[in-house]
Image (tube, grey):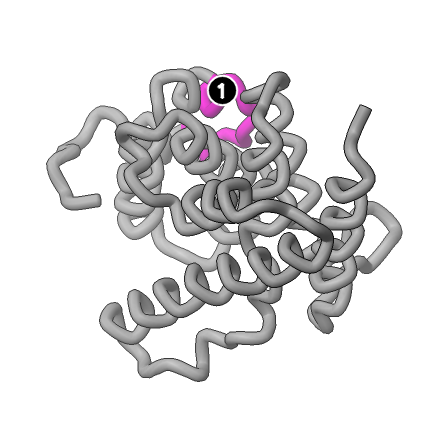
Amino acid sequence: MSEPRFERAIQAFRQVSAADPVRERVGDDARPRELVHLERLVTWVERLAPDASEPLRLAAHCQHIGRFRVPRESFPEGRGGYLRWRAALARQHAATAADILREVGYDHETIASVERIVQKQTPATDPEVQTMEDALCLAFLEHEFPAFSAKHPDDKLVTILRKTWRKMSERGHEHALALPLDARAQRLVAAALTGPSKEPR
């Protein structure tokens, strides 16, 4: 049975995400985008790690908490600005999650574990961080890649898929290959897997 503080933390995380002013259509409903993405990520974490630790389960609910509060436009254009934006987001997500976890009574060790996962530190050596990385990539491929691919040429998409593939574990690869991708996405994945793969992560 879940502890009351776990339920309070999840409710608080969802309350922040529900404030996202951007809506994403799911079926007949237009829902807060961050909340939709949260639920998709949680689904994948639970699928990949049915016996996940409490910190990993918490991290799944707050991985991108309050992302809408720091728009990409608040940082310079170009890759340098993008990387600074991503670093700032990771720090904000971890800090926001830590504040909520302290408020509902979590100890320092649990909070530190959640911060470690949210900031995706040492994914190559940390099974929980790798599970999160797999879940993020799989959620992107399953739910976001179709619309994303419609806006970009094949060569750019192949590069993105190669980078995505390198972030995942073998388990993640197996799940990715089992996704019901459309014909174009399948062709792009095949091209990504058969081309050069030595680009930096």
Image point (32%, 35%), residue name: 123
Q: Which residue is nearer to you in this view: 199 or 155? A: 199
- Bounds of the magenta segment: 175-186
- Where is the C terminus found, in terms of image quarters? top left
Query: Does residue 165 sit above or below 95 in this rendering?
Result: above
Where residue 122 sits, quadrant-wise, is top left
Query: Split into 4 quadrants, where in the image is the N terminus?
Result: top right
Above or below 97: residue 118: above
Q: Which residue appears at 59% of the width and 41% of the height? A: 60
Q: Is residue 176 left or right of residue 24?
A: left
> Furthest residue to the right?
28
Write the residue at 35% across / 17% down.
170
Magenta segment includes 179? yes
Q: Position of residue 169 (x, y in %)?
A: 35, 23
Percent x, y for residue 190? 33, 26
Within the image, what quadrant is residue 5 found in?
top right
Q: Position of residue 80 (x, y in %)?
A: 23, 72
- Helix, strand or loop at mark 1: helix
Q: Is residue 47 left or right of residue 94?
A: right
* Total marks placed: 1
Q: Does residue 11 belong to the magenta stretch?
A: no
What residue sits right under mark 1 in the picture? 175
The one nearer the camera, 184 or 109, is 109
